[in-house]
């Protein structure tokens, strides 16, 4: 079939325009997230994250190991199966759709740079983007450095839409509530400014739970407070610090250490699924998971961390979001916990280092932004 010249020209132009549009679409990176949820698990080792339950820590002898409830719940024959049963959401969704850093078996190293290997210095480094020798204890001293949360809260689009919750009464000092004005639910009470009957019920539940550790509540009230905040207050930036993994490890309760990680994974799933069911969050929210420090690597020191436990320098992190390529467990890359702060900002399309040049850069390859 032949076409008149004018029509042939129109057809050719149409194809050319279509090709240009297609090429432009292919070259356009996915949009940044408009919201971010950050969840940390205190002192959660890379050994369990990547390999699941460690058999020798499940009991003192073979009989005690195989008869333990933790063995029945979490032991499987391969590391991949063990980690999947321990943290099913992490491995089926986060690792599949995002990126994970810190697996030594893949040549991927992650660690803190502060040289202290315990909590406050770890959180300060993670959230401020740098290690500061002035932060050298777990004392309740206001963080001298601006965290990425405080910085974001100072930007017009985020002001009043940043919320923090943590299972540790040092959280208000880490985010420096006095200077930053950020709300910080630290378990005393979990909801710092209760507005609803449900908020008040969460605080009442926290009061009714036993005070097992000084200054560190159980994770459950913090989890519920954060979920309620997302559901009703719609923050653009939400931080949740979970602490039971560290507390039960210090107690030498490997069974409860594993169980607290299993519940943390379930909480992450609930938080993510809630967000994906809300129009302003669905497809527009990034997720960051990390830890503040590691732990000892042997049966003798796995319960501990700090200056005398060099293995506690090893950490991990994970990222998932609309602009994050699904690369899974990253290989042959070395990163630091200090990179988390700029990563949180970069996922939102913001440049934390423009304000804090000393901060570490974002984790490599976590966005397609050019």
Image (spheres, rainbow, N blue to C red):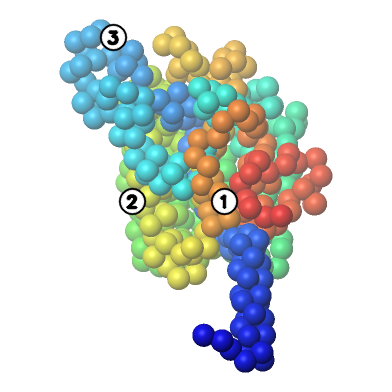
Which x, y percent locates residue 60? 28, 9
Is disc 3 placed on a helix, strand or loop? loop
Q: Earlier in the sequence, mark 1 or mark 3?
A: 3
Is disc 2 placed on a helix, strand or loop? helix
Q: Is residue 296 above or below residue 183?
A: above
Q: Tell me which corner region of the image, top left, top right, bottom left or bottom right, holds residue 365.
A: top right
The tag on residue 205 is 2
Closer-to-camera residue (283/250): 283
- Horizontal side of 253 relative to 102 (left or right) equals left
Q: Separation of disc 2 and disc 3 at Cα?
A: 36 Å
Residue at horizontal 24 percent and vertical 23 percent from the top: 71
Residue at horizontal 44 percent and vertical 28 percent from the top: 50
The tag on residue 324 is 1
Badge 1: how crowded within 10 Å, few (<14), some, or many (20+)?
many
Which dot, 1 or 3, sits closer to the camera?
1
Res. 107 visible in picture: yes
Residue at horizontal 52 percent and vertical 85 percent from the top: 1
The tag on residue 71 is none
């Amino acid at each position: 079939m032949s076409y008149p010249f004018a029509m042939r020209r129109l057809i050719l132009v149409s194809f050319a325009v279509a090709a240009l549009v297609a090429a432009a679409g292919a070259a356009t990176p996915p949009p940044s997230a408009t919201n971010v949820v950050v969840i940390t698990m205190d002192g959660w080792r890379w050994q369990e994250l990547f390999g699941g339950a460690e058999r020798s820590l499940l009991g003192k002898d073979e009989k005690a190991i195989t008869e333990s409830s933790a063995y029945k719940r979490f032991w499987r024959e391969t590391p991949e199966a063990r980690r999947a049963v321990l943290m099913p959401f992490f491995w089926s969704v986060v690792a599949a759709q995002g990126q994970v850093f810190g697996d030594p078996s893949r040549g991927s190293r992650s660690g803190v740079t502060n040289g202290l290997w315990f909590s406050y210095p770890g959180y300060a480094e993670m959230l401020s983007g740098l290690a500061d020798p002035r932060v050298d204890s777990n004392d309740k001293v206001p963080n001298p450095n601006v965290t990425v949360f405080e910085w974001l809260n100072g930007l017009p689009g985020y002001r009043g839409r940043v919320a923090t919750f943590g299972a540790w009464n040092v959280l208000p000092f880490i985010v420096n509530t006095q200077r930053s004005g950020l709300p910080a639910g630290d378990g005393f009470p979990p909801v710092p400014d209760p507005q609803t009957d449900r908020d008040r019920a969460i605080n009442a539940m926290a009061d009714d739970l036993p005070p097992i550790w000084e200054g560190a509540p159980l994770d459950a009230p913090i989890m519920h407070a954060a979920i309620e905040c997302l559901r009703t207050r719609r923050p653009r930036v939400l931080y949740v610090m979970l602490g039971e993994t560290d507390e039960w490890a210090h107690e030498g309760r490997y069974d409860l250490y594993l169980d607290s990680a299993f519940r943390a994974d379930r909480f992450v799933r609930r938080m993510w699924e809630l967000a994906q069911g809300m129009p302003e969050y669905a497809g527009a929210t990034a997720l960051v998971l990390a830890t503040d420090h590691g732990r000892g690597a042997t049966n003798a020191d796995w319960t501990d961390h700090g200056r005398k436990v060099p293995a506690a320098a090893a950490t991990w992190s994970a990222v998932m979001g609309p602009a994050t390529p699904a690369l899974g467990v990253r290989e042959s890359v070395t990163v630091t916990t200090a990179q988390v702060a700029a990563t949180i900002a970069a996922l939102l399309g913001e440049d934390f280092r423009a304000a804090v040049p000393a901060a570490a850069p974002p984790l490599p390859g976590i966005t397609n932004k050019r």
